[in-house]
Image (cartoon, rainbow, N blue to C red):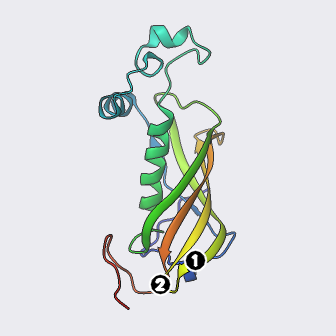
């Protein structure tokens, strides 16, 4: 499945249930895992110590689940779908289905599930199914995001609100 890279974001009115966007791939390595451990303060040895991790049910080191989810949000941004159109990420749910190991490559599949015109005429909620898959096509995270998107077809920069 190829990646989707848009030259502009999609606003609420341009999206329909079933629309799907696929990110480029990104490999997660030792430096990503170490940097996330430092940034988050999560120094669980299952992420950092191969000897320790070999004795766990994972049989080796794994990336932090929230690192994988964070990278997925960056991959979503890189598709272009949210450029100039997103107001906020309002809600997120996820199930960690499979471990990501150092050296694995992931991509994100975003599919529009539903739309709700609330909260008003300038913005609407879009619910997305989010699926992070590895280089073998196995789902590593399955979840949903709820975003608040502009309805206007006029692109905006992040933080810029219309006064209409």
Tell me: residue 116, above or below residue 102: below
Q: Are marks 2 and 1 in contact (CB under 8 Å)?
A: no
Considering depth in this image, is 80 or 97 the residue closer to the camera? 97
Q: Does the rendering let one see residue 145?
A: yes
The crowd level at tag 2 (other Cα within 10 Å; few <14, some 14-19, many 20+) is some
Q: Which residue is mark 1?
A: 118
Q: Residue at x 39, y 27 (%)?
A: 42
Q: Does the rendering let one see residue 15?
A: no
Picture quarter with the C terminus: bottom left
Q: Between marks 2 and 1, how big is the CA–CA gap?
A: 9 Å
Q: Residue at x 45, y 68 (%)?
A: 82
Q: Secondary structure at mark 1?
A: strand
The crowd level at tag 1 (other Cα within 10 Å; few <14, some 14-19, many 20+) is few
Picture quarter with the N terminus: bottom right
Tell me: residue 41, above or below residue 8: above
Q: Residue furthest bottom?
A: 164
Considering depth in this image, is 151 or 15 the residue closer to the camera? 151
Q: Which mark is residue 73?
A: none
Left or right of 85? Residue 34 is left
Q: Which residue is mark 2?
A: 122
Tell me: residue 159, above or below residue 55: below
Q: Secondary structure at mark 2?
A: loop
Counting every numbered tag in the picture gives 2
Residue 89 at x, y percent in the picture: 47, 61
Q: Residue furthest front?
A: 119
Residue 107 at x, y percent in the picture: 53, 48
Q: Quadrant of residue 28?
A: top left
Q: Residue at x 49, y 44 (%)?
A: 69
Tell me: residue 59, above or below residue 69: above
Residue 156 at x, y percent in the picture: 35, 79
Considering depth in this image, is 7 or 11 the residue closer to the camera? 11
């Amino acid at each position: 499945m190829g990646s989707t890279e848009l030259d502009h974001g999609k606003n609420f009115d341009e999206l329909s249930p079933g629309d799907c966007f696929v990110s480029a791939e990104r490999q997660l390595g030792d430096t990503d895992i170490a940097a996330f451990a430092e940034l988050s303060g999560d120094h669980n040895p299952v992420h950092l110590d191969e000897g320790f991790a070999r004795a766990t049910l994972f049989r080796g080191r794994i990336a932090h689940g929230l690192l994988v989810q964070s990278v997925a949000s960056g991959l979503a941004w890189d598709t272009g779908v949210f450029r100039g159109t997103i107001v906020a990420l309002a809600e997120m749910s996820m199930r960690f289905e499979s471990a990501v190991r150092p050296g694995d490559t992931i991509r994100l599949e975003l599919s529009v599930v539903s739309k709700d015109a609330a909260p008003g005429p300038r913005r609407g909620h879009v619910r997305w199914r989010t699926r992070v898959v590895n280089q073998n096509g196995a789902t590593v995270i399955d979840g949903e995001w709820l975003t608040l998107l502009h309805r206007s077809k006029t692109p905006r920069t992040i933080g810029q609100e219309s006064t209409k």
